[in-house]
Image (cartoon, grey):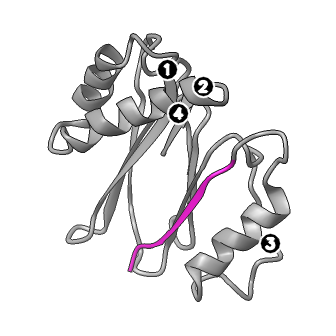
């Protein structure tokens, strides 16, 4: 999840630069990936960024985030993940990486600051564990801020 700081052309340039770097370095550890991206896009205004790696064989997940992107697991072993303070491209002090085990029926949700930080899934029962695309649309429609860009990803782990 990549969100260029601010709005408009320069935010888009920062997000595209970060995406280009991440896409060409997917095999690196999250620590190396974030620090390399930070150096590679320092000429931009920077981004908030969260990355999740799911190991489907081990049913495990690894999350790292800098800035105001959010992630959570819904279902058995559910949890919210924290992003570290800072800006990718503007320097950050520490990347906190979280790891957890997954269950086959977990949902992974990731979102940007255009959706409130404390996302509650009560009231979305008709979508949970059935239709990820409709769940994403409903959350975006109900919680997306008109004054900010908003992105949400919903992924079924099983």
- Report x, y in % for residue 103: 41, 75
> Is 156 included in the stretch rendered in magenta?
yes
| Residue 8 figure quarter | top right
Q: Is residue 16 above or below residue 71?
A: above
Residue toward you, 90 or 52: 90
- Report x, y in % for residue 136: 65, 69
- How many tags in the picture? 4
Q: What residue sits 67% from the left and 30% below the top?
A: 7
Which numbered marker is on residue 12?
Answer: 4
> Is 7 included in the stretch rendered in magenta?
no
Side of 25 relative to 133 (left or right): left
* CB-based contact (under 8 Å), mark 1 and mark 2: yes
Q: Secondary structure at mark 4?
A: helix
Q: Nearer the viewer, mark 1 or mark 4?
A: 4
Alpha carbons under labels 4 and 3: distance apart: 33 Å
Magenta region, residue range: 150-158
Which numbered marker is on residue 125?
Answer: none
The residue carrying mark 3 is 122
The residue carrying mark 2 is 5
């Amino acid at each position: 999840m990549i969100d260029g700081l601010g709005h408009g052309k320069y935010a888009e340039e920062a997000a595209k630069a970060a995406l280009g770097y991440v896409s060409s370095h997917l095999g690196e550890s999250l620590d190396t990936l974030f620090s390399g991206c930070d150096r590679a896009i320092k000429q931009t205004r920077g981004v908030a960024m969260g990355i999740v790696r799911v190991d489907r064989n081990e049913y495990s997940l690894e999350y790292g985030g800098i800035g105001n992107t959010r992630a959570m697991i819904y279902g058995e072993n559910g949890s919210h993940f924290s992003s570290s303070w800072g800006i990718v491209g503007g320097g950050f002090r520490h990347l906190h990486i979280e790891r957890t085990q997954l269950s086959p029926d977990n949902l992974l949700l990731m979102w940007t600051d255009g959706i409130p930080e404390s996302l509650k899934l009560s009231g979305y029962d008709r979508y949970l564990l059935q239709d990820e695309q409709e769940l994403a649309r409903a959350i975006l429609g109900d919680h997306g801020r008109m004054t900010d860009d908003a992105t949400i990803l919903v992924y079924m782990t099983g």
